[in-house]
Structures are given as structure tokens and as C-alpha cells.
Image (cartoon, helix red, strand yellow):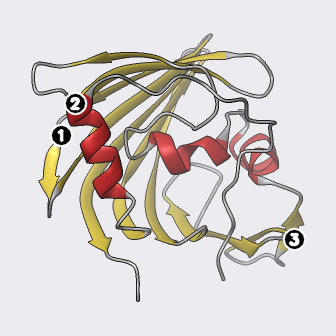
Amino acid sequence: MWLALAACTSLQPVAPIGNTDFQANEQALRAYPNWALTGRLNVKQSQKSDTVNLNWQQQQQRFEIRLWGMIGLGATRVYGGDHGVTVEKAGEKPVQLPNLEALTKDYLNFEFPAAYLLYWVRALPVPGIAATTEFDASSRLSSLSQRDNRGRLWQLTFERYVQVQDVVLPGRIKLATGDLQLTFLIDQWQLNAATP
């Protein structure tokens, strides 16, 4: 019932980000490989806009996402394992997809590096990919630029940080490339430490 999130590109070593407060928060986040969030995702492209509700549960490198509310999408559950993605849409037979990017293209009518969201949604750069970063006065990541495996440059901004246990996490994330803009509005975070 879970889906492995992993970038499909060859990752090259890059220099670590030199903000010690950010690095401390990033290190603390590693103690919570199991987490969940609820919120909404707004999609704007070519003068069109739509919003989908989402519930994302992450356990180690596996996850399950439930989506509902977007016009034409209906209630949808995305899950899987190391061998692909399964999409269950209300009233239809389950569909097997090769990866998350196929989900965005086939079901949402736009493409974005969905596998990178494992990092971006927690205000972390994707490891091994060159990143341009800016920080706010509290040493929290305020903007991030990274390229996806197709070479597109993504501009991200992070706002409305909240304290969740001993880490800070964003409440609003904007991702943009070309005429496509995605905005995550996160209503609730839940963190669970790794099981010994």
C-alpha cells in the first residue's frame, strides 16, 4: 500500500549548504522517517486553476497519497512499492504506472518531478543536485532553485513555518517553472520517530 519515492536521476556530489541552523534542522528531520501531512494543492497553468485535497502518509521510503476534490480527478489513492505505482480511482479498475511522473502527466495533465517532493515538501533540497538557496532571518529556507531530470529549473519558496516537535516545517510551498505553478497549503504535520 505504499510507494517508494526516489529520484530517477544520477545524483552527483554537491557542496553542503553552509547554514548551520538549517543543517541542524535537516539533521533533526532525519530522526522522523515516518510522517504525515494533510492539506491542499493548487495548480495554475495557462490561465487555468484547480485545487485538490491531499493526505500524504510517509513511512521510511514508502508512501500513500489520497487525493480528492480536483475537477475530473475524483477520489484517488496512489500507492505502490519498488516495482511501480498503483492508482485507484473511485469507480474504476486500478491502474499500474511505471513512476510518479506518469501519474502527473496522465491524471493531472501537467508534469512535475513528483519524486522530488519527498524532499521539497519538507523544505529540503534534493540531495546530490546543485541547489541555489536563500534563508530568512531565522535561518529557515526561504527559496530554493533546482533542476529536474529534464533540465527544467524549478523555483520554490517556503513560508508559514511551524514548529513541530523539535523541527520546523513549512506551511506553504510554491513551486514554479514556466507557466506552471503549484502551491501546497499544509494544514497539519505529524511526525513519528523511527522504530528501534
On the image, the x and y values in percent for residue 70 come to 53, 50
User: Foreground mark, 1 or 2?
Assistant: 2
- The type of residue carrying mark 1 is Tyr
Q: Nearer the viewer, residue 57 or 4?
A: 4
Circle on res. 83: 3
Quarter of the view holding residue 19? top left
- The type of residue carrying mark 3 is His
Q: Quadrant of the C terminus?
A: bottom left
Q: Residue at x 84, y 78 (%)?
A: 93
> Up-down: is 110 above or below 168?
above
> On the rendered structure, is 47 left or right of 20?
right
Q: Residue at x 65, y 51 (%)?
A: 72
Identify residue for label 2: 140
> On the rendered structure, is 70 left or right of 129?
left
How far, Cα to Cα, is label 1 from label 2?
Answer: 8 Å
Identify residue for label 1: 161
> Mark 1 or 2 closer to N-term?
2
How far, Cα to Cα, is label 1 from label 3?
Answer: 35 Å
**Cβ–Cβ under 8 Å for marks 1 and 3:** no
Q: Nearer the viewer, residue 157 or 48?
A: 157
User: Element under label 3?
Assistant: loop
- The type of residue carrying mark 2 is Arg
On the image, the x and y values in percent for residue 177 come to 59, 16
